[in-house]
Image (cartoon, rainbow, N blue to C red):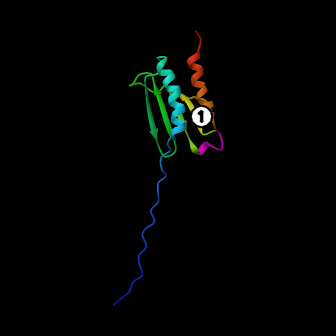
């Protein structure tokens, strides 16, 4: 009878989980979204959760490119800021650590000139 050493299980490299918005963050984003929908500015949204970024995209009409993207990038937390609002043309309109402050750039656009 031969006794063999047990064969260890292969090491499985875990892929990082997707970055997602938490309940508080979604509450802040949906508050601004609701105000803009009530004003007739926005009509649709999409949420994407990827490995390195979570994105809330806002659309004027469903079949368009997003007007704005609200991004959460945990890797930029210590440098430029965890959150960013990106315009349709790819320019970063505002970036920072506090989501409520970052979203104020969108609220100012609601007030706009009369």
Of the 4 image quadrants, the one containing the C terminus is top right
Q: Position of residue 13 (x, y in %)?
A: 47, 60
Question: Extreme left residue here?
Answer: 1
The residue at 57%/44% (across/down) is 74
Q: Is any part of residue 6 visible from this angle?
A: yes
- Estimate how packed mark 1 is, as few (under 14), some (14 to 19) or many (20 or more) residues with alpha carbons within 10 Å: many
Give the main secondary structure of the magenta stretch: loop
Q: From the viewer's perspective, is residue 73 above or below residue 113?
A: below
Count of labels in the image: 1
- SS state under label 1: helix
Q: Is any part of residue 88 visible from this angle?
A: no
Label 1: which residue? 99
Q: Position of residue 36 (x, y in %)?
A: 50, 21
* Left or right of residue 20, residue 61 in this image: left
Q: Position of residue 50 (x, y in %)?
A: 47, 43
The residue at 59%/15% (across/down) is 112
- Which residue is more in the foreground, 5 or 103? 103
Q: Position of residue 26 (x, y in %)?
A: 51, 35
Instruction: Confirm whether the magenta stretch covers residue 76.
Output: yes
Instruction: Confirm whether the magenta stretch covers residue 36.
Output: no
Of the 4 image quadrants, the one containing the N terminus is bottom left
The residue at 57%/19% (across/down) is 109
- Over which residues does the magenta segment extend? 75-80
- Which residue is more in the foreground, 34 or 106? 34
Question: Extreme right residue here?
Answer: 79
- Which residue is more in the foreground, 65 or 39? 39
Question: Extreme bottom residue here?
Answer: 1
């Amino acid at each position: 009878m031969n006794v063999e050493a047990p064969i260890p299980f292969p090491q499985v490299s875990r892929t990082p989980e997707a970055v997602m918005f938490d309940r508080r963050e979604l509450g802040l984003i949906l508050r601004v979204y609701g105000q803009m929908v009530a004003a007739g500015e926005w009509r649709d949204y999409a949420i994407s959760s990827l490995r390195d970024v979570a994105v809330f995209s806002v659309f004027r009409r469903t079949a368009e490119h997003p007007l704005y993207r609200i991004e959460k990038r945990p890797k930029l937390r210590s440098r430029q800021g965890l959150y960013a609002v990106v315009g349709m043309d790819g320019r970063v309109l505002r970036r920072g650590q506090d989501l409520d402050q970052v979203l104020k750039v969108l609220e100012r656009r609601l007030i706009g000139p009369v």
